[in-house]
Image (cartoon, helix red, strand yellow):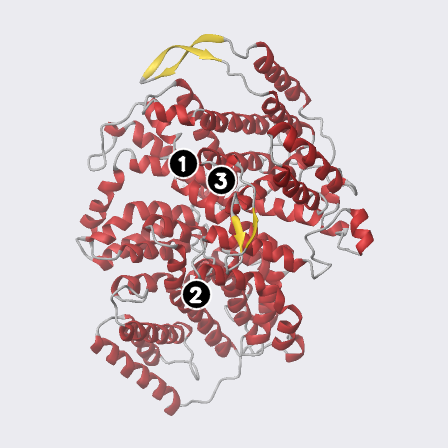
Amino acid sequence: MSGIWVHVRRALAYLFKPEIKSRRVLSEGVTRGNLLLLGVFSAIVLLLSVVLAGQTFQIYLPHLVGWQWVDVTVIRLPIWSWLVLWGIGAGLCLVPRVTAITIGVAFSLYYIYAAVNGATIQLPGGVVLAKLPYLPIYAYHYFLPLFIVFSGVLVFTYYPAGDRSPQTRPSTCDIVLCLLTLAAVFDFMWNFEERGDRSGLIYWNDVIFGTVMAIVSIEMCRRILGLVLPLLGVLFIAYTWFGTSIPEGIAHGGFPFNEVIAYLNSESGIYGTVTNVFATYVFLFIVFGAILQQTKIGDVFVDIAFSLVGRFKGGAAKTAVVSSGLFGSIAGSGAANIAVTGTFTIPLMRRSGYAPHYAAGVEATSSIGGQLMPPIMGSAAFLVAANTDINYSYVALVSFVPALMYFYSVYMSVHFRACRAGIGGLPREELPSFKKVLKKDGYKLLPVALLIFLLIIGFSPFYAAFWSIVGALAISCFNENSRQLQLPNPIAALIGWGGRPTPEQGEKVHKGLIVDWGGSVAGIVILIGLPLFFGMSMASTLFFAICGTVLFSSPRLIDTLSQGAIASLVIGATAGIMGIVLAGVTLPGLALRFPAIILEYSQGSLPLAILLCAIASYIMGMGLTITAAYVILAILAVPALVELGVPLLNAHLIILWLSQDSSLTPPFALGAFIAAGIARSDPTRTGFIAVLLAKPLYVVPFLMAYSPILMDPGAAWWDIIIVWATAFIGFYSLAVAIEGYFRRKLSWMERALFMGAAIGFFFQIWWVKLAAVAMLALGVALQIWLRQPEMVTSPVRAGD
């Protein structure tokens, strides 16, 4: 039996582990491992573009509801499109590193420019400064499929399929998957209008390329996030296809395979809402976060946190909480937050006396909370705005105070843990001065201030993110060590514009891609090529020529844009699979039936329904990302919460908060794993500490359901303020009770008083709140009046 149990544990660990492979380190120069594939691919391209173009063949293919002999005509394409396709394939075969960097940069630039495509730039008084060129490549049927194809090509290039795959170059299978993704997405774009004209009739290309995209979406996700979400996608495809074989209650009549795949390969499936939100909003903020990291703007938040709270008791842990909240408010990524702030704070916490797993838990909890902190919340928050049809700025506004409660709760927990363990603050001489930090680096925060300002005055997050990126790049020019923008070497030398990167900062990465005259050559090519091949006006051509000259002269900027694209793959890899899950829910009508199931099991009780959602979130969190867990629960559970009387926005935010634990909940917690790796601690112990510290994730949802904590329309300001005040006091009391320390260690009776007070403050009944006040007062009085001599502080580290 013990042997069987060992195999079961290994299987579960493989199934649920947060990451299967790390990224490839692509080799520099020319690789020869795929020369045979290049020859075959070149022959196929030549055959399709020259020999077979325009010819019609009869092939046995899926058509309408079954398989038939179908006339298939090989389409004629402009020669430049075949050259682009061949160039991508040849580049992946011969020079994958340079090709991947180029695709990553193109990925970032395409979606950055989307925010201002054809826009008029004007001053507040209406004075027009410029009108940016309009590019027709941002139509709906280009914008969404290109997000999938960019993500797919980069995933298959950077992430190997398994341990036996090449670790320095993409394998033959990887390149074939890249080319199939390109072909399938091209078919979607090329036949988009025709597909609409035939009004739901299913042709062979819908099924063939839809099957390709389903496989590609599943494999993309598997390579980065493991097996759970891909298996869930396969399960929903099977559920849609074999509806009559499902247990009664969620059974349905079933759909033909052709119809299932065609539905997946549409705006209702893979190219649906999730892809739209990721491409429109989330991607830009990920690139913005990458720029903040590369320009060292994120370090300013860490320095500010050190200067503000570093000298207090448990100063290292408090610095982790504050810095993670500040950086997380503009990073929007828990993993990036841990990587940036945890590198500094975790070693400091360990040195101060916190146990390694506790230090990692504090950092993981604080960093994940950054996805709840405005102005840039996590990617799921943009889905909240899309699903509720409410402006994102309003979602961020009502989320601000609950986010403060989250960080306040963690802050007080580490404070009382430090008091109990006798951990003091950091030496004053090791801490930066707040005034000096603002004086020296305060200007670096201007892009963040610009972002907040644009959101407040009503601009879209898309537009605000663009100008914040521009602001960050402009700010970087004031520091030669982090300067992103560079001019061609001859011009830079003439005006003394330094800032070439050192080899450690990335110049080696771009050897062969950037040369001293690369920017000048790029500008000349653009000046000649755009009018000649695309008929672009001279003004537009000049604009893009200047941009190209600066880009190809700036190795740091190329590296930053490439890193931003790579950072987006964690969410990009889930876009297609989440579309599959959504299709599996909506096509058979499961979204209409599941709320009834929740209502049945909760017996119409709202607290029990929220508890069921929390349990479901915990289980899903073992193998899904925060965004994936939110999307699934939002579809299945929000209607039930709304039917029980919860406002729509509140219901979605309840699910959003519950979904945050997917990065913290043992035994498979990605955020806890990352922090544990930095702290060299046990990931499971780290996860349990993180869940304990993240208790607001399970308390605030109940406040959202029963109180006007979100400034509900029609609620009196007095009621809102009372809810805010009592919730803060409740989290204070809860921290005291859980840590077992106030002015001294708590007895069991004192602990019960503080715990009872905490619970009472979260209730929305006036006499219960009064009882909570009485219990809190009695607990504090006992701590003061029955003062006992303090024990000599034990050398045992906090958290042991």
Circles 3 and 1: CB distance less than 8 Å?
no
Residue 694 on image: x %, y %: 42, 63
Point out the frontmost of discs 3 and 2: 3
Q: Residue at x 39, y 72 (%)?
A: 738
Q: Which residue is mark 1?
A: 231
Q: Residues within 10 Å of mark 3 (few under 14, many from 20)?
A: many
Q: Quadrant of residue 775?
A: bottom left
Tell me the element at label 2.
Answer: helix
- In this view, the residue in front, 795 or 93, is 93
Instruction: In the rendered view, tell whether residue 311 sits above or below residue 325.
Output: below
Q: CA distance from mark 3 to mark 2?
A: 30 Å
Q: Residue at x 39, y 80 (%)?
A: 746
Instruction: In the rendered view, tell whether residue 327 sits above or below residue 503.
Output: below
Q: Pick whichever of labels 2 and 1 is earlier in the sequence.
A: 1
Give the amino acid type for the residue marked by disc 3 in the picture.
Ala
- 594 left or right of 308 in image: left
Q: Which residue is mark 2?
A: 693
Q: Pick whichever of labels 3 and 2 is earlier in the sequence.
A: 3
Give the amino acid type for the residue marked by disc 1 in the picture.
Leu
- 699 left or right of 415 in image: left
Q: Residues within 10 Å of mark 1 (few under 14, many from 20)?
A: some
The reply to whether residue 438 is visible in this rendering is yes
Tell me the element at label 1.
Answer: helix
